[in-house]
Image: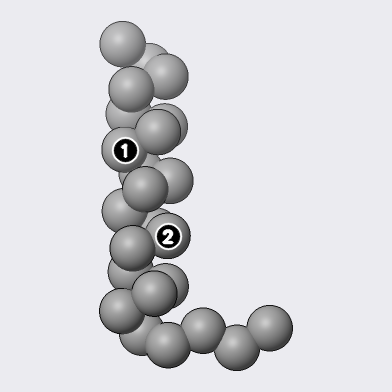
Amino acid sequence: MEWTKPEFTVVAVTMEVTAYAATK
């Protein structure tokens, strides 16, 4: 699977936010 840099950044940020919210 090939991702452009902006798309990968969006996915990474979304995963980070989800993980952060899960810890609250």
Mark 1 residue type: Val
Label at residue 6: none
| Number of disc labels | 2
In the rendered image, the quadrant that contains the N terminus is bottom right
Image vertical order of residue 10 relative to residue 20, above or below: below
Residue 23 or residue 5, whichever sits in front: 5
Image vertical order of residue 23 relative to residue 19, above or below: above
Q: Mark 2 sits on what residue?
A: 11
N-term mark: 1 or 2 = 2
Question: Residue at position x 42%, y 88% from top?
Answer: 4
The CA span between labels 1 and 2 is 10 Å
Q: Outermost residue toward the top?
A: 24
Within 10 Å of disc 2 (Cα), the crowding (few <14, some 14-19, many 20+) is: few
Q: Secondary structure at mark 1?
A: helix
User: x, y percentage for residue 12?
Assistant: 39, 58
Q: Mark 1 sits on what residue?
A: 17
Question: Residue at position x 31%, y 38% from top?
Answer: 17
Q: Secondary structure at mark 2?
A: helix
User: x, y percentage for residue 24?
Assistant: 31, 11
Mark 2 residue type: Val
